[in-house]
Amino acid sequence: MRLRISNCRRDVRAALALMSLSLAVSCATQPESSQTSAPAPAISPVAPPPAIPAASRTSAKGSKAVRASYQGNAQVGRRTASGEIYDPNDLTAASRTLPLGSSVIVTNPSTGRSVKVRINDRGPYVRGRSLDLSKRAAEEIGLTDKGVGRVKIKRAAKPEESKPETSESSGVSAVSTSTSSSSASSDR
């Protein structure tokens, strides 16, 4: 009886070894014609989900209530998403959804104070928060005592849209005029 069990074990081990070997050989040998004849399928990038229009996320007045916090001094000297160095004395903020470079007016409803900030970074990456103010901006609206609070944000018009373009165009023409006159004097 003992002889049968040891022979059976040996047969099972041999069968497992043979199956493992055949599996390894079949995976290692693939016909090369299939690799060269059919090009590899191109992996297409996954499209990002469609953005929700800003009008549908805001109230009729154009303001939106969000939860905000402020960045302390831990981030001082580090680069923001826009590439500039974080300065807690600037009137800036971080947002995950608002475009970099845009400006918003942040109002603390409990104090009634408002401040205009420029979005220059991404964040906050804490669930339930939508805006991370610089220390100075938080101080101006009275958010530093609590650290986190409900604020109302409203998009502000870009400064370039409200400024007339005559000062820029006259500066450019003055440069081009001086360049052309200097080249004309060098031709003489």
Image (spheres, rainbow, N blue to C red):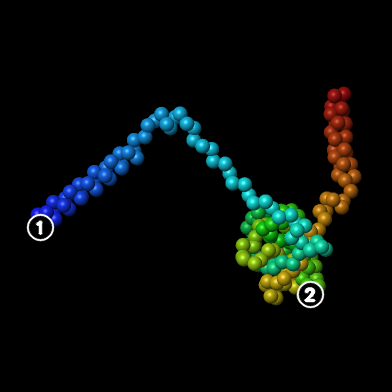
Identified at 59% across, 46% down, the residue is 46
Residue designated by label 2: 111
Crowd around label 1: few <14 · some 14–19 · many ≥20 (10 Å): few
Tag 2 secondary structure: loop
- The residue that appears at 51% across and 37% down in the rendered structure is 41
The residue where tag 1 is placed is 2
Question: In the rendered image, is residue 20 in sight?
Answer: yes
In depth, the one of 170 and 4 nearer the eye is 4
Camera-side residue of 11 and 146 = 11
**Which three-letter amino acid code belongs to the residue tagged 1?**
Arg
Spot occupied by residue 84 in the image (x, y as percentages of width and height)? 68, 54
Instruction: Choose the circle earlier in sequence order: 2 or 1.
Output: 1
Name the residue at 76% across, 67% down.
152
Place of residue 105 in the rendered image (x, y in percent of width and height, measured from the top left): 79, 63
88 with respect to 113 (left or right):
left
User: Is residue 83 something one can see in this rendering?
Assistant: no
- Disc 2 to disc 1, C-alpha distance: 90 Å
Give the vertical position of 136 relative to 32 (above or below): below
Q: Residue 171: where, in percent of width, then height?
A: 86, 42
Residue at x 79%, y 59% (from the top left corner): 155
Q: Which mark is residue 168?
A: none
